[in-house]
Image (cartoon, rainbow, N blue to C red):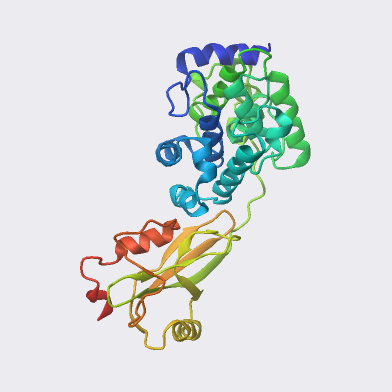
């Protein structure tokens, strides 16, 4: 066992996180799997409430497999990266049909499931089964990049290969569940992206970045690019009952499979054409303030337009009784609508 692993395990006994809702004794591999998928690109503080809600709705693997996609997406709505929810659902169905509902514990079978990559497979098997498997999530990349002062952006293949080598080198043959949780905890609580708490770090005495006092330079960043901006109008059709029209989005692209307002380019010609196509009797009532919603690769400016759409009921939903998976911007717009007196928006 390397000194790095020894120091980390000693620190974990006193300072590691041991009371997260997916941590149990003995471990529940379904819970571990679900948490690891949710934690991809999402912080623990955000995941906790979603995890608890998800487990209430789908207590077992069988419950998840037998659920409809709409139910799964509704429970996931707000977490983002919705392909994760679809892959969870697909994997649960595969486990139920091909493994009789028993979660596979071999690396080759696990990594073949939708949405499970090398690091996620390693985390599941180490945390749930105490197998000696390396992990390399964002926190671990940061810890190892600083500790070994690894030059280069970790998205580059050569750098990533080196980080995997180091991850395997430090992964012990025993106490693997504790080690995996410890190195993730270290990255999340001590070796933070900004202002790392090196004075409290159990491995700082041998950390090359700390010794060189250039922790802020690692991991090295990708060359910065300016995210482009797009603008869309969201057409909020309301009928005489104050119900809103929502359409299910395609299964590919942003907010795939969720329910949203009709959208179009934010110009008079496009808006007018879209309104006529939906309802010839529809008329614009007002516009809500424009707001920005950011994605990984671009910023989206959204202008909600409130539209009186008389005579239609099909596809319209009561905003007080919605049980659909909705993107965050759609939830925001709905929260601004006057549900107590819809006529105000329809005059």
User: On the image, which quarter does residue 208 sit in?
Assistant: top right
Percent position of residue 89, x then y: 56, 45
Q: Quadrant of the N terminus?
A: top right
Which residue corresponds to the image point at 40% horizontal and 38% vertical from the top-left? 56
Residue 187: image location, x then y, percent:
55, 28
Between residues 140 and 200, which one lies in front from this camera angle?
Answer: 140
Q: Is residue 233 left or right of residue 169?
A: left
The residue that appears at 35% across and 59% down in the rendered structure is: 322
Up-down: is 253 above or below 108? below
Q: Say whether residue 180 is visible.
A: no
| Residue 173 left/right relative to 71 | right
Residue with the most extreme left position: 341
In percent of the image, x 49 and y 32: which residue is there? Answer: 195
- Residue 73 position, x and y percent, is 49, 51
- Quarter the C terminus occupies: bottom left
Q: Position of residue 49 (x, y in %)?
A: 39, 39
Asked whether residue 246 is in view, the answer is: yes
- Of 36 and 16, the residue lying toward us: 36
**Vertical placement of residue 115 versus 239, above or below:** above
Of residues 11 and 44, which is closer to you in this image? Answer: 44
Residue at x 76%, y 31% (from the top left corner): 162
Q: Dividing the picture into quarters, in which one does residue 311 lie?
A: bottom left
Exactly how many numbered labels are in the figure? 0
Image quadrant where residue 94 sits = top right
Front-most of 317 and 121? 317
């Amino acid at each position: 066992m390397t000194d790095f692993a020894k120091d980390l395990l000693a620190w974990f006994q006193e300072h590691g996180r041991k009371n997260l809702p997916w941590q149990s004794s003995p471990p529940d591999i379904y819970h571990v799997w679900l948490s690891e998928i949710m934690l991809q690109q999402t912080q623990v503080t955000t995941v906790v409430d979603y995890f608890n809600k998800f487990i209430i709705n789908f207590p077992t693997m069988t419950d998840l497999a037998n659920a409809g996609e709409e139910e799964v997406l509704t429970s996931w709505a707000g977490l983002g990266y919705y392909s994760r929810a679809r892959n969870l659902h697909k994997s649960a169905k595969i486990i139920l049909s091909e493994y009789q509902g028993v979660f596979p514990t071999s690396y080759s079978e696990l990594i073949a499931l939708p949405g499970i990559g090398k690091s996620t497979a390693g985390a599941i098997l180490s945390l749930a089964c105490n197998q000696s498997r390396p992990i390399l999530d964002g926190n671990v990349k940061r810890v190892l990049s600083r500790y070994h002062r690894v030059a280069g952006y970790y998205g580059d293949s050569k750098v990533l290969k080196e980080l995997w080598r180091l991850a395997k080198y430090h992964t012990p043959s025993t106490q693997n569940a504790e080690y995996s949780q410890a190195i993730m905890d270290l990255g999340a609580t001590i070796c933070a992206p900004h202002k790392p708490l090196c004075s409290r770090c159990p491995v700082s005495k041998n950390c090359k970045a700390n010794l060189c006092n250039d922790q802020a330079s690692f991991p090295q960043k990708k060359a910065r690019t300016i995210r482009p901006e797009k603008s869309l109008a969201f057409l909020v059709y309301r009928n005489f009952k104050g119900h809103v029209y929502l359409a299910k989005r395609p299964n590919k692209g942003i907010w795939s499979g969720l329910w949203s307002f009709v959208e179009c380019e934010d110009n008079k010609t496009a808006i007018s054409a879209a309104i006529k196509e939906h309802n010839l009797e529809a008329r614009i009532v007002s516009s809500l303030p424009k707001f920005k919603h950011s994605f990984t690769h671009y910023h989206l400016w959204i202008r909600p337009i409130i539209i009186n759409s008389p005579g239609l009921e099909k596809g319209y939903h009561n905003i007080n009784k919605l049980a659909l998976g909705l993107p965050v911007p759609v939830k925001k717009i709905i929260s601004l609508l006057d549900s107590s007196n819809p006529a105000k928006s329809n005059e």
